Image: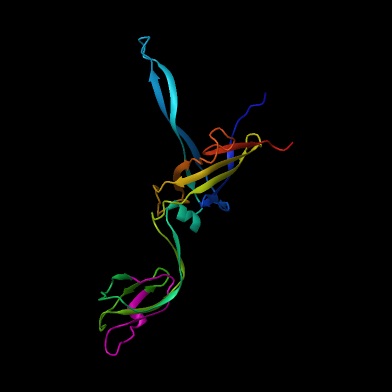
């Protein structure tokens, strides 16, 4: 009889659920770790006839299926998923005469945008004077400015610039999304293919998001599979989902 060992590799997908229907599958990139954990609350009954107080009956009261894993590829969809946030596309626009208040030499000031172009600064004299570029250092990518010399500048200083289009991903602002999870796997021990489907999953908002790395970043995710009560308890699709073994083609 052949040994039935298992060593899995594969591709993970999420499909956002809207109005109870799972949409298109989205490949979430390389996942070096992923674990399913099945839990249960068990009612135990102790008999009182033998003097040994043994357990003579158990009953499963509730069950749970939880997941945990690591994501490595951080596109804007994965970032939104990890941060339990929402993506917002911020279009480029022009800001006219934004007041920076009283500026001091050596202080760094954040302007309202990124990838800035056509940047100029004026003071509040009558008439207003344009501040020479030699008096400040601009970081247009991150939208910051340091005034090196404020002598002769009448405050408040005003900034005019055009900001570029960017994507904002908010933190901890969307806890309602549900996803079907699908795994296309291969058992490298024997060549069989396997598939896993969890009908409904919801990610936990709890996570860690390192901002400094010595190596490639990995981001922990965890969450829970929710039951789909439209499925039969003992049916072939299961309340939470199911594991499929697909034999290698003859």
* Residue found farthest to the top: 50
**Which residue shows up at 51% across the image and 49% down it?**
179
Residue 9 vs residue 64: left or right? right
Q: Position of residue 102 (x, y in %)?
A: 25, 76
Count up the numbered dots.
0
Where residue 64 appears, as percent x and y from the top left, is 45, 36
Q: Position of residue 24 (x, y in %)?
A: 58, 53
Question: Residue 29, can we see it?
Answer: no
In the picture, the quarter occupied by the N terminus is top right
Q: Is residue 6 left or right of residue 84?
A: right
Task: Confirm whether residue 129 shows in the render.
Answer: yes
- Front residue (pair 6, 41): 41
From the image, which quarter does the C terminus lie in? top right
As drawn, the residue found furthest toward the right would be: 250
Is residue 116 a member of the stretch shown in magenta? yes
> In the rendering, at what x and y percent does residue 193 appear?
64, 39
Give the camera-side residue of 158 and 91.
91
Q: Of 144 and 151, which appears nearest the observer?
A: 144
Q: Range of the magenta residues?
A: 110-137
């Amino acid at each position: 009889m052949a040994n039935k060992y298992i060593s899995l590799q594969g591709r993970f997908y999420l499909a956002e659920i809207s109005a109870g229907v799972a949409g298109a599958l989205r490949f979430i990139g390389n996942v070096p770790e992923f674990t399913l954990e099945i839990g249960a609350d068990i009612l135990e009954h102790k008999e009182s006839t033998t003097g040994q107080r043994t357990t003579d009956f158990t009953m499963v009261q509730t069950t749970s299926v939880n997941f945990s894993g690591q994501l490595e590829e951080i596109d804007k969809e994965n970032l939104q998923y990890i941060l339990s946030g929402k993506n917002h596309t911020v279009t480029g626009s022009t800001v006219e005469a934004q007041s920076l208040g009283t500026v001091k030499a050596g202080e760094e000031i954040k302007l309202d945008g990124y990838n800035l172009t056509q940047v100029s600064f004026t003071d509040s004299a009558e008439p207003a004077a344009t501040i020479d570029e030699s008096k400040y250092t601009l970081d247009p990518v991150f939208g910051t400015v340091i005034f090196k010399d404020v002598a002769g500048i009448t405050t408040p200083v005003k900034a005019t610039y055009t900001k570029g289009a960017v994507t904002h991903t908010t933190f901890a602002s969307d806890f309602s999304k549900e996803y079907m999870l699908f795994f296309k796997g291969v058992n490298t021990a024997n060549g069989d293919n396997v598939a896993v489907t969890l009908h409904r999953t919801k990610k936990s908002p709890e996570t860690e998001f390192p901002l400094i790395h010595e190596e490639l970043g990995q981001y922990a995710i965890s969450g829970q599979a929710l039951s789909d009560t439209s499925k039969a308890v003992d049916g072939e699709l299961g309340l939470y989902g199911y594991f499929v073994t697909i034999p290698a083609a003859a």
